[in-house]
Amino acid sequence: MKIFQQLLQLNARKRGFHIITTEVLNVMPQIAEIKTGICQVFIMHTSASLTINENADPTVRQDFEMYFNKAVPENDPDYRHDYEGSDDMPAHLKASILGSSVMIPIRNGRLALGMWQGIYLCEHRDYGDARKLVITAWGE
Amino acid sequence: MKIFQQLLQLNARKRGFHIITTEVLNVMPQIAEIKTGICQVFIMHTSASLTINENADPTVRQDFEMYFNKAVPENDPDYRHDYEGSDDMPAHLKASILGSSVMIPIRNGRLALGMWQGIYLCEHRDYGDARKLVITAWGE
Amino acid sequence: MKIFQQLLQLNARKRGFHIITTEVLNVMPQIAEIKTGICQVFIMHTSASLTINENADPTVRQDFEMYFNKAVPENDPDYRHDYEGSDDMPAHLKASILGSSVMIPIRNGRLALGMWQGIYLCEHRDYGDARKLVITAWGE
């Protein structure tokens, strides 16, 4: 078994859902050296998240942004944590609903994603910073 | 450390939540060879998902279907992605809320599930296809 | 590659969101022996869950409890599974929305958490028991 780890700092993105599959692959060419394994992508933040979803039609990502804005409303008067603005607490909640990591099997030197699957960066802040990811791949 | 990987194609299920723990175990007998490790189950689709929840009372799974249909409504006029019908975009959203993989520790040759835990296939489409899973187990 | 596994039984907590990062670290000192790896924390229950979120301001955890109580209401007359009280089925649903495990990269003998990230125990029952965790760390 071998294991590789890379840091990836993404350029700041606008609020919304963004496909980052190619950026992840580019920073971890060692996936090609693994016949059977796993690749984890982890985000070191609490107001942005990662998920796997449809990689083709951009309206899917627009609908994600629309849905999560309805499901996790801004300006709920019951929020106590609002120091950083109306997008602050909703960003934390969306981050935990969607999750801080994705785990993808490696098979024959490639990510075993389904035909329609891509990795999304979910940017929940109006003005999110450059986001730091840790990518770890292991197997044999 | 050793690592094993198996593909499992599940028969098409009706929309709803279905326990698949036994099917996963049957396709990965090598779990018995691992004293300490992890088993990941990954679904190669964006309109079905995996979760771990209560393995006994079937009304729990019925309540999951009821709840998620309320929480992620069909026919929201704000959806832009609706090519495949009213269950299309809600299926993508539910898939990301619940997640595309589960990770279960292996302990003494068995999945270290709690007494009440089972693995659910969450089928979010009215007529989902046979779903493909990748099961990977590693440890020593 | 080496792999370590520890059981951790948490004292019963009141309903809500609780930071447990230090308890996890204390039971797994072997993280210090891993230069590159992963640590998984798994909860063996279906009415409590784990997530990663903001580790500083306690109002964030209060807002989590407030939000999830609104998003997953008690006493929905459509619930069929309510044997154990009004917090029963909502606890199962919250557990699957938040998830039964977190996976954190290990880098240079430490968890590679971001500055603001901590591990939450999410206790969804009014009177949850002592909760059992399985912690597994691997790498080289």
Image: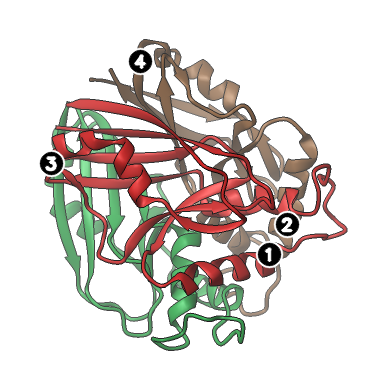
Chain colours: A red, B green, C brown
Marked residue chain, label 1: C
Per the model, the C-alpha gap separating discs 3 and 2 is: 42 Å
Q: In what element is the residue under mark 4?
A: loop
Task: Check disc 2 and give the amino acid type.
Answer: Tyr
Q: Are marks 4 and 3 in contact (CB under 8 Å)?
A: no
The residue that appears at 20% across and 52% down in the rendered structure is B25
Q: Quadrant of residue A77?
A: bottom right
Marked residue chain, label 2: C
The residue that appears at 74% across and 53% down in the rendered structure is A87
Q: Nearer the viewer, mark 4 or mark 3?
A: 4
Q: Position of residue A13 (x, y in %)?
A: 56, 50
Residue identifier under label 2: C67
Rendered image: mark on residue B52: none
Residue identifier under label 4: C35
Per the model, the C-alpha gap separating discs 4 and 3 is: 28 Å
**In the figure, is residue B4 to the left or right of C23?**
left
Reply above or below: C11 against C79: above
Q: Are marks 2 and 1 in contact (CB under 8 Å)?
A: yes
Nearer to the camera, B87 or A28: A28
